[in-house]
Image (cartoon, grey):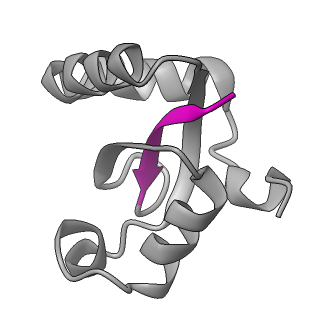
Amino acid sequence: MGYWVYILASERNGTLYVGVTNDLARRVQEHRKGVVPGFTRTYGVTRLVHAEPHDDIRIAIEREKRLKKWRRAWKLALIEEGNPGWRDLYFDLNR
């Protein structure tokens, strides 16, 4: 897959961040290292808890925009559905 929509969390039920990228492992590593100043570095949002692959960047960007508008409860339900233990999926990525 070429593009990813992802959700990061600071901890279980913690602060959430929704993003899109073409290189999930690299982008999550950047968040984890705090390379780019901003929201995720300020709030310690580094745990990859949800990721969706997409072939088309336009579809991925549209999905990201929709997820950002979702109510928090809906995002939590989405995470719980695919990752009920809130495992850090970063460690499952092929690097």
Give the overall secondary structure of the magenta segment: strand
Q: Pinpoint residue 36: horizontal percent, then vertical percent.
A: 29, 80
Q: Pinpoint residue 52: horizontal percent, then vertical percent.
A: 57, 26
Residue under the image location 20 percent in, 29 percent down = 68
Q: Quadrant of residue 67?
A: top left
Residue under the image location 45 percent in, 19 percent down = 77
**How many discs appear?**
0
Q: Is residue 40 left or right of residue 94?
A: left
* Magenta stretch encompasses residue 6: yes
> 60 or 83: nearer the eye?
60
* Placement of the C terminus among the 4 image quadrants: bottom right
As displayed, is residue 34 above or below residue 73? below
Residue under the image location 58 percent in, 18 percent down = 55
Q: From which residue to which does the magenta span run?
A: 1-9
Residue under the image location 25 percent in, 73 percent down = 43
Q: Pinpoint residue 87: horizontal percent, then vertical percent.
A: 70, 50
Q: Pinpoint residue 80: horizontal percent, then vertical percent.
A: 57, 26
> 36 or 89: nearer the eye?
36
* Magenta stretch encompasses residue 37: no
Q: Is residue 88 left or right of residue 44?
A: right
> 28 or 2: nearer the eye?
2
* Placement of the N terminus among the 4 image quadrants: top right
